Image (cartoon, rainbow, N blue to C red):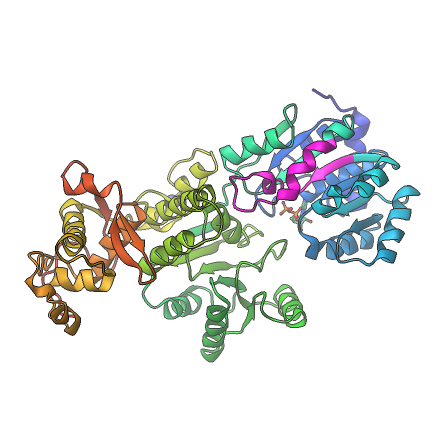
Amino acid sequence: MTSPHASDADQALAVLGRVFGYDSFRGQQREIIEHVIGGGDALVLMPTGGGKSLCYQIPALVRPGVGVVVSPLIALMQDQVDALRAAGVRAGFLNSTQDLEERRLVEAEFLAGELDLLYLAPERLRVESTLRLLERGTISLFAIDEAHCVAQWGHDFRPDYLQLSQLHERWPDVPRIALTATATRATHAEIASRLKLQDARHFVASFDRPNIQYRIAPKNEPRKQLLALLRGEHEGDAGIVYCLSRASVEKTAAFLVEHGIEAVPYHAGLDARTRAENQSRFLREDGLVVVATIAFGMGIDKPDVRFVAHLDLPKSVEGYYQETGRAGRDGLPSTAWLAYGLNDVVQQRRMIDTSEGDEEHRRRLAAHLDAMLALCETVECRRVQLLAYFGQESGPCGNCDTCLTPPKTWDGTVAAQKVLSTVVRLKRERGQSFGVGQIVDILLGRKTDKVIRFDHDALSVFGIGTDLTEAQWRGVVRQLLAQGLLAVQGEYNTLALTDDSADVLAGRREVPLRSEPEKPARTSTKSGG
Ligand code: ADP
Ligand code: ZN
C-alpha cells in the first residue's frame, strides 16, 4: 500500500493543468496517478477513450527520471510524441521505422536526462543493447500499453510481450503500470501473472458506454440497410463502417458516394498517402463516413463519431467492443449497428477451419466466435451480455434493440430435427453432403433442377418443412450453426452434424430459437419464393 504525500497530489493536479490544459481528473485517474507516483504497480482496465494515457504521463512527469512506455502501435508513436512535444513534454521514441542516426539522437537525449517519456516498440526490449541503454539512465516508471497483447488467450497476442516480465527482474524498484481497454476476467488474470504484477493494485473502470445504442439486425441487403440507417438516423453525421474485406470496403464506399453520402475508403491495400489523407479528412471534417477494414481506428481519437456500423461479423466480442467503442466518445447518443446473417457464420467457421496454426489456436478462435455469435443470437439485453463478457454485472439497459423490441422465442426442437435428419439422410442414404440452399429446397419440397437431378424428391424428408418460410429455415440453420448443433465443411460449405447433434435428433435436448424479426415464426404456410 502506498499513501501519497499531499504534495504528490498537488503536483499531479498542477501538471494536469499546466501541461495538458485540463482542470480535473476523470474517473479513477487521480487514484491511479497518485498510486504510481507513490511507487506502486498498477493494472488498469479502462475502456477506449477513458483517458489511460494521462495515468502514466503525469507520474512520469512528476517522478524523477524517464518514463518508458512500451507500445505495439508503432504507426502512432510519431504522432503521440509530436503531440507531447507540442505541449512542452520532452518525449522521444525508438522503433524500427527509424534510421541509425535518428535512433542515436534519441539514445543520447535519454542518457543526458533530456527526456521525460520514451516510447518503445516491444521488440526493442528483445535487443540486449536496448536493455543496457536503459540501465545507464534513470527510469521513473514502465508503462505497458495495450497490455492484453501479453495474453495468449486474447485476440491480439504478441510474442514480444512475453519477455516484458523481465522488466521487473531487472528493475525491481521501478513502478510498472499496465494498461488495456480490452480484457475479460480470464485475460485480466493472465496479464497479471505473465507480467508478474502480483502485487499490483487493480483499477477496473466500468465498461459501460450508456450513450451507445447497440443494435444487431438480420442481414438481407447490407448496403441498402446501411443507407437506410444513414438517411433515417444519421444524415450528415460522422461515422465508421467496418467491412471484412478490402473489396467490400471499396464497393461500399463507392455505393455510399453514388447515393450522395460523403464517404472514403480505408484499408491496408491503399497507398500510405491516400490512407493518411482519408484519415486526416475524417478527423478534420464534419460528417465524413469512413468505410474501413479493422486496420482503421486504433488510436483514432475523434469525439463526435455518431455511429459505427459493421457490415460483417467481428471475430470476437473484444473486437466488437473496441470498434463500437469509437462511437460517442463525447458522451452524446450514438449508434452501434451490426448486420449479421447466415453467411457470416458459414464464412467465419470456414475461415477458422482453414486457418494456419495448431488445434489450440483454432479452438481459441472458435471460442471467440462462439461468444460473438451468442451476443448476436441473444434474446436478452445486449448490454447485459456484453458487460457480462467483461466480468461486469448489470441490469437491462432500455437502450438496445432487444430491450426496445424484445425478440420472440419459439421452441425450435422439431424444426432443428427436420434440418438435422435431412443432413443425416443425405449422408447415410446417398453418401452426399450439401450446402444450406439445397437442404432448404428439400425441406420446402421444391422441385428445382438440382433437386430433380439428384433425385432428392424421393427422399422421405422431401417437403417436410412447408410450415416455415425460406427465411425462417435459413434462420434455423444459422442458429444451429451458432449453437454448434450443425457444422460447415469442405470447400463447398456443406452442412454436417456435430457431436451435439445426436442429442437433438434423439429428443434429449430442446432447441429454443429466436424468431426472425421480419415475420413471426410458425404462422406462415407454404412459401413459393
Ligand atoms: P485511452 O488511451 O484510454 O483510449 P486517451 O488517453 O487517449 O484515452 O484519452 C482520451 C481523450 O480524453 C483524450 O483526448 C484526452 O486528452 C482526454 N482526456 C483524458 N483525461 C482527461 C481529463 N482528465 N479531462 C479532460 N480530458 C481528458
Ligand atoms: Zn438493453
Can residue 401 be seen in this snapshot?
A: yes
Residue 163 figure quarter: top right
Nearer to the camera, 505 or 217: 505
Residue found 50% across the figure and 33% down from its top: 186
Give the quadrant of the C terminus: bottom left
> In the image, 13: left or right of 160?
right
In the rendered image, the residue lying farthest to the bottom is: 258
In this view of the protein, which residue sits in the foreground, 456 or 281? 456
* Screen quadrant of the N terminus: top right
> Residue 166 in magenta?
yes
Q: Which residue is drawn at 32% across and 45% down?
A: 378
Q: Specify whether residue 314 is painted magenta.
A: no
Q: Which residue is drawn at 10% across and 57% down?
A: 467
Q: Where is residue 462 shown, x and y percent of the image? A: 9, 60
Q: Position of residue 361 (x, y in %)?
A: 47, 44
Is there any visible trace of residue 516 in the rendered image? no
Residue 299 at what x, y percent from top left? 63, 53
Q: In this view, does 228 lie above or below 172?
A: below
Q: Is residue 170 left or right of residue 273?
A: right
Q: Which residue is drawn at 80% across and 44% down?
A: 117
Write down the region rendered in magenta.
Answer: 141-167
Looking at the picture, does residue 135 appear above or below residue 334? above
Count of marks placed on residues: 0
Q: Up-down: is 148 above or below 80? A: above
Q: Position of residue 203 (x, y in %)?
A: 61, 31
**Farthest residue toward the right?**
112
**Direction front: furthest residue:** 431
